[in-house]
Protein backbone atom coordinates (compact mmCIF):
# COMPACT_ATOMS: atom_id res chain seq x y z
CA UNK A 1 0.00 0.00 0.00
CA UNK A 2 0.91 3.65 0.02
CA UNK A 3 2.99 5.61 2.45
CA UNK A 4 1.72 8.80 4.03
CA UNK A 5 -0.78 10.79 1.99
CA UNK A 6 -0.20 14.48 1.36
CA UNK A 7 -3.10 16.43 2.91
CA UNK A 8 -5.75 17.07 0.27
CA UNK A 9 -5.62 20.85 0.67
CA UNK A 10 -1.90 20.73 -0.13
CA UNK A 11 -2.45 18.28 -3.01
CA UNK A 12 -5.00 20.62 -4.58
CA UNK A 13 -2.53 23.50 -4.38
CA UNK A 14 0.27 21.37 -5.86
CA UNK A 15 -1.99 20.44 -8.76
CA UNK A 16 -2.98 24.09 -9.28
CA UNK A 17 0.70 25.14 -9.38
CA UNK A 18 1.96 22.14 -11.37
CA UNK A 19 3.36 22.98 -14.83
CA UNK A 20 1.01 20.44 -16.44
CA UNK A 21 -1.99 22.32 -15.02
CA UNK A 22 -0.57 25.82 -15.51
CA UNK A 23 0.95 25.45 -18.96
CA UNK A 24 -0.85 22.67 -20.76
CA UNK A 25 -4.47 22.56 -19.60
CA UNK A 26 -6.65 25.48 -20.79
CA UNK A 27 -7.64 28.02 -18.14
CA UNK A 28 -11.36 27.53 -18.81
CA UNK A 29 -11.07 23.87 -17.80
CA UNK A 30 -12.00 23.05 -14.23
CA UNK A 31 -10.50 20.20 -12.28
CA UNK A 32 -13.03 17.69 -10.99
CA UNK A 33 -12.91 16.33 -7.49
CA UNK A 34 -10.57 13.39 -7.04
CA UNK A 35 -11.64 9.76 -7.06
CA UNK A 36 -9.50 7.03 -5.42
CA UNK A 37 -8.32 4.28 -7.74
CA UNK A 38 -5.87 1.42 -7.47
CA UNK A 39 -2.92 1.34 -9.82
CA UNK A 40 -1.64 -1.71 -11.68
CA UNK A 41 -1.58 -4.78 -9.46
CA UNK A 42 -3.94 -3.17 -6.91
CA UNK A 43 -0.98 -2.39 -4.67
CA UNK A 44 -1.01 1.40 -4.61
CA UNK A 45 -3.81 3.89 -4.25
CA UNK A 46 -3.87 6.82 -6.65
CA UNK A 47 -6.31 9.62 -7.29
CA UNK A 48 -7.94 10.20 -10.66
CA UNK A 49 -9.83 13.23 -11.94
CA UNK A 50 -10.97 14.87 -15.13
CA UNK A 51 -10.67 18.33 -16.59
CA UNK A 52 -13.79 19.79 -18.17
CA UNK A 53 -14.56 23.08 -19.90
CA UNK A 54 -16.90 25.63 -18.36
CA UNK A 55 -17.98 28.52 -20.53
CA UNK A 56 -19.53 31.45 -18.69
CA UNK A 57 -21.40 34.22 -20.48
CA UNK A 58 -22.80 37.25 -18.62
CA UNK A 59 -26.45 36.80 -17.75
CA UNK A 60 -26.54 33.15 -18.82
CA UNK A 61 -25.99 29.84 -17.04
CA UNK A 62 -22.48 28.45 -17.42
CA UNK A 63 -22.22 25.74 -20.05
CA UNK A 64 -20.43 22.70 -18.68
CA UNK A 65 -18.70 20.59 -21.29
CA UNK A 66 -17.88 16.92 -21.48
CA UNK A 67 -14.56 16.03 -19.81
CA UNK A 68 -11.67 16.47 -22.23
CA UNK A 69 -8.73 15.19 -20.19
CA UNK A 70 -8.27 12.60 -17.45
CA UNK A 71 -5.36 12.42 -15.06
CA UNK A 72 -3.94 10.29 -12.29
CA UNK A 73 -2.04 11.64 -9.31
CA UNK A 74 0.16 9.99 -6.70
CA UNK A 75 -1.36 11.17 -3.39
CA UNK A 76 1.90 10.54 -1.52
CA UNK A 77 3.88 12.98 -3.67
CA UNK A 78 1.33 15.17 -5.44
CA UNK A 79 2.89 14.34 -8.80
CA UNK A 80 0.95 13.58 -11.96
CA UNK A 81 1.59 10.03 -13.12
CA UNK A 82 -0.66 10.20 -16.16
CA UNK A 83 -2.58 12.77 -18.20
CA UNK A 84 -4.71 11.45 -21.05
CA UNK A 85 -6.67 13.20 -23.75
CA UNK A 86 -10.18 11.75 -23.78
CA UNK A 87 -10.16 11.71 -27.57
CA UNK A 88 -7.40 9.07 -27.25
CA UNK A 89 -8.72 7.06 -24.30
CA UNK A 90 -12.15 8.10 -23.10
CA UNK A 91 -12.94 6.84 -19.61
CA UNK A 92 -16.59 7.77 -20.25
CA UNK A 93 -16.94 6.25 -23.74
CA UNK A 94 -20.25 4.64 -22.75
CA UNK A 95 -21.90 8.00 -21.93
CA UNK A 96 -23.61 10.18 -24.55
CA UNK A 97 -21.08 12.13 -26.66
CA UNK A 98 -22.85 15.46 -26.15
CA UNK A 99 -20.31 18.31 -26.01
CA UNK A 100 -22.38 20.14 -23.35
CA UNK A 101 -23.41 17.97 -20.41
CA UNK A 102 -25.21 20.57 -18.33
CA UNK A 103 -25.95 24.17 -17.51
CA UNK A 104 -24.87 25.57 -14.17
CA UNK A 105 -26.74 28.43 -12.53
CA UNK A 106 -25.84 30.29 -9.36
CA UNK A 107 -28.92 28.81 -7.69
CA UNK A 108 -27.54 25.28 -8.24
CA UNK A 109 -24.25 26.04 -6.52
CA UNK A 110 -23.64 24.05 -3.33
CA UNK A 111 -22.72 27.32 -1.57
CA UNK A 112 -23.92 30.83 -2.35
CA UNK A 113 -21.00 32.86 -1.04
CA UNK A 114 -17.24 32.69 -1.31
CA UNK A 115 -16.99 32.03 2.41
CA UNK A 116 -19.58 29.25 2.21
CA UNK A 117 -17.78 27.65 -0.72
CA UNK A 118 -14.43 27.87 1.10
CA UNK A 119 -15.94 26.15 4.16
CA UNK A 120 -17.53 23.39 2.05
CA UNK A 121 -14.33 22.81 0.06
CA UNK A 122 -12.30 22.66 3.30
CA UNK A 123 -14.82 20.21 4.76
CA UNK A 124 -14.40 18.00 1.69
CA UNK A 125 -10.59 18.21 1.87
CA UNK A 126 -10.73 17.13 5.52
CA UNK A 127 -13.10 14.31 4.58
CA UNK A 128 -10.64 13.14 1.90
CA UNK A 129 -7.85 13.10 4.49
CA UNK A 130 -9.91 10.76 6.67
CA UNK A 131 -11.12 8.62 3.74
CA UNK A 132 -7.92 7.90 1.82
CA UNK A 133 -6.19 5.74 4.45
CA UNK A 134 -9.25 3.46 4.64
CA UNK A 135 -10.45 3.55 1.03
CA UNK A 136 -11.60 0.16 -0.27
CA UNK A 137 -11.34 -1.56 3.11
CA UNK A 138 -14.12 -3.99 3.96
CA UNK A 139 -16.54 -2.80 6.65
CA UNK A 140 -15.30 -5.56 8.97
CA UNK A 141 -11.90 -3.84 8.94
CA UNK A 142 -13.26 -0.36 9.71
CA UNK A 143 -13.67 1.06 13.17
CA UNK A 144 -16.86 2.94 14.02
CA UNK A 145 -14.98 6.23 13.58
CA UNK A 146 -13.68 5.15 10.18
CA UNK A 147 -17.17 4.08 9.08
CA UNK A 148 -18.43 7.49 10.18
CA UNK A 149 -15.61 9.16 8.18
CA UNK A 150 -16.63 7.22 5.06
CA UNK A 151 -20.27 8.23 5.51
CA UNK A 152 -19.27 11.86 6.12
CA UNK A 153 -17.14 11.90 2.96
CA UNK A 154 -20.05 10.49 0.96
CA UNK A 155 -22.41 13.18 2.25
CA UNK A 156 -20.05 16.06 1.52
CA UNK A 157 -19.07 14.65 -1.87
CA UNK A 158 -22.74 14.38 -2.85
CA UNK A 159 -23.28 18.04 -1.91
CA UNK A 160 -20.48 19.35 -4.14
CA UNK A 161 -20.92 17.21 -7.28
CA UNK A 162 -23.13 18.66 -10.00
CA UNK A 163 -25.75 16.01 -10.82
CA UNK A 164 -25.03 16.12 -14.56
CA UNK A 165 -21.34 15.33 -13.88
CA UNK A 166 -22.13 12.41 -11.58
CA UNK A 167 -21.98 9.79 -14.38
CA UNK A 168 -18.47 10.98 -15.27
CA UNK A 169 -17.29 10.61 -11.69
CA UNK A 170 -18.76 7.12 -11.63
CA UNK A 171 -17.00 6.33 -14.91
CA UNK A 172 -13.60 7.28 -13.46
CA UNK A 173 -13.76 4.34 -11.08
CA UNK A 174 -17.05 2.47 -10.67
CA UNK A 175 -15.47 0.22 -8.02
CA UNK A 176 -14.90 3.19 -5.71
CA UNK A 177 -18.53 4.29 -5.86
CA UNK A 178 -19.75 0.73 -5.36
CA UNK A 179 -17.55 0.51 -2.25
CA UNK A 180 -18.66 3.96 -1.06
CA UNK A 181 -22.36 3.11 -1.40
CA UNK A 182 -21.80 -0.17 0.41
CA UNK A 183 -19.79 1.30 3.28
CA UNK A 184 -21.37 4.74 3.73
Image (cartoon, grey):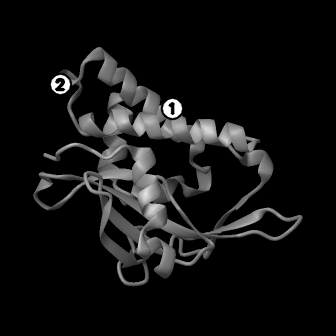
Which quarter of the figure is the C terminus placed in?
Answer: top left
- What residue is shown at x 30% (from left), y 71% (from top)? 82
Residue 155 in the figure: left or right of residue 60: left
Q: Is residue 81 above or below residue 145?
A: below
* Residue with the most extreme top position: 144
Q: Are marks 2 and 1 in contact (CB under 8 Å)?
A: no
Q: Is residue 87 above or below residue 151?
A: below
- What residue is shown at x 25% (from left), y 37% (from top)? 133
Residue 93 visible in this rendered orientation of the protein: no
Residue 41 in the figure: left or right of residue 112: left
Q: Quadrant of residue 8?
A: top left
Mark 2 or mark 1: whose residue is earlier in sequence: 2
Residue 89 in the figure: left or right of residue 39: right
* Residue 9 location (% of width, % of height): 45, 46
Residue 113 visible in this rendered orientation of the protein: yes
* Residue 99 location (% of width, % of height): 61, 76
* Residue with the most extreme bottom position: 88
* Residue 100 location (% of width, % of height): 65, 71
Label 2 sits on a secondary structure element that is helix
Q: Is residue 26 above or below residue 171?
A: below
Mark 2 neighbour class, 10 Å CA radius: few under 14, some 14 to 19, many 20 or more: few
Q: Which mark is residue 141?
A: 2
- What residue is shown at x 23% (from left), y 23% (from top)? 142
Marks 2/1: CA distance?
21 Å
State how many labels appear: 2
Q: Which mark is residue 155?
A: 1
Label 1 sits on a secondary structure element that is helix
Q: Which mark is residue 36?
A: none
Mark 1 neighbour class, 10 Å CA radius: few under 14, some 14 to 19, many 20 or more: some
* Residue 137 location (% of width, % of height): 21, 34
Q: Nearest the camera: 7 or 88?
A: 7
Amino acid sequence: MNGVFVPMRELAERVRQHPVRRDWIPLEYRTSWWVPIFGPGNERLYLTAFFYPVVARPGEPSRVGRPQLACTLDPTTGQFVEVTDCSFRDFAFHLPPDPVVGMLTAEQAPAHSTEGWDRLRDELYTAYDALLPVAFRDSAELTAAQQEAVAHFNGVFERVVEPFLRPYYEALNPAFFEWLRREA
